[in-house]
């Protein structure tokens, strides 16, 4: 029963996320991306907590993988955001 409930929540979040992102105007994509990067930063903190619990080996490996992937997501997201913001800067002579 729990698997059905969790699958329902997953499908609902996928649909809702798609609908929200699809309706965002192009001028708001940069602030939206910055917010997503902040949420990924929270994911890094949670993953570090999971990796350092001292539980079974699989939990530590999953935690370390989550730290790596979330860190890549945060760094890449900020690089893309910086590049997008650079397009709006005036160019020097």
Image (cartoon, helix red, strand yellow):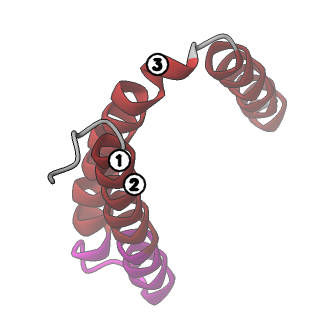
Query: How far apart, in angstroms, are the residues tagged by discs 2 and 1?
Result: 6 Å
Q: Which residue is mark 2?
A: 77
> Which residue is rendered at x = 32% and y = 31% of the image?
35
Q: Quadrant of the N terminus?
A: top right
Please tell me in which quadrant of the rendered image residue 11 appears: top right
Residue depth check, mark 2 versus mark 1: number of the one nearer the observer: 1
Residue located 80% across and 33% down the image: 7
Query: Could you tell me which secondary element the residue under label 3 belongs to?
Result: helix
Count of marks placed on residues = 3
Q: Which mark is residue 81?
A: 1
Q: Position of residue 89 (x, y in %)?
A: 23, 40
Residue 44 percent location from the top left of the image: 29, 59
Mark 3 sits on what residue?
Answer: 27
The boundaries of the magenta stretch are 51-68
In reply to whether residue 52 is colored magenta, the answer given is: yes
Find out whether the residues at labels 2 and 1 contact each other: C-beta distance under 8 Å.
Answer: yes
Residue 21 falls in which quadrant of the image? Answer: top right
Mark earlier in primary sequence (3, 1)? 3
Residue placed most toward the observer, 86 or 29: 86
Residue 9 in picture, x, y percent from top left: 71, 24
Which of disc 2 and disc 3 is earlier in sequence? 3
Reply above or below: 16 against 87.
above
Q: Report x, y in % for residue 53.
A: 24, 72
């Amino acid at each position: 029963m729990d698997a059905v409930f969790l699958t329902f929540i997953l499908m609902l979040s996928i649909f809702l996320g798609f609908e929200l992102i699809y309706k965002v105007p192009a001028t708001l994509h940069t602030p939206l991306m910055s917010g997503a990067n902040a949420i990924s930063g929270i994911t890094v903190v949670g993953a570090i907590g999971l990796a350092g619990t001292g539980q079974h080996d699989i939990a530590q490996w999953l935690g370390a993988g989550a730290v790596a992937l979330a860190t890549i997501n945060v760094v890449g997201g900020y690089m893309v955001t910086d590049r997008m913001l650079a397009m709006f800067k005036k160019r020097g002579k």
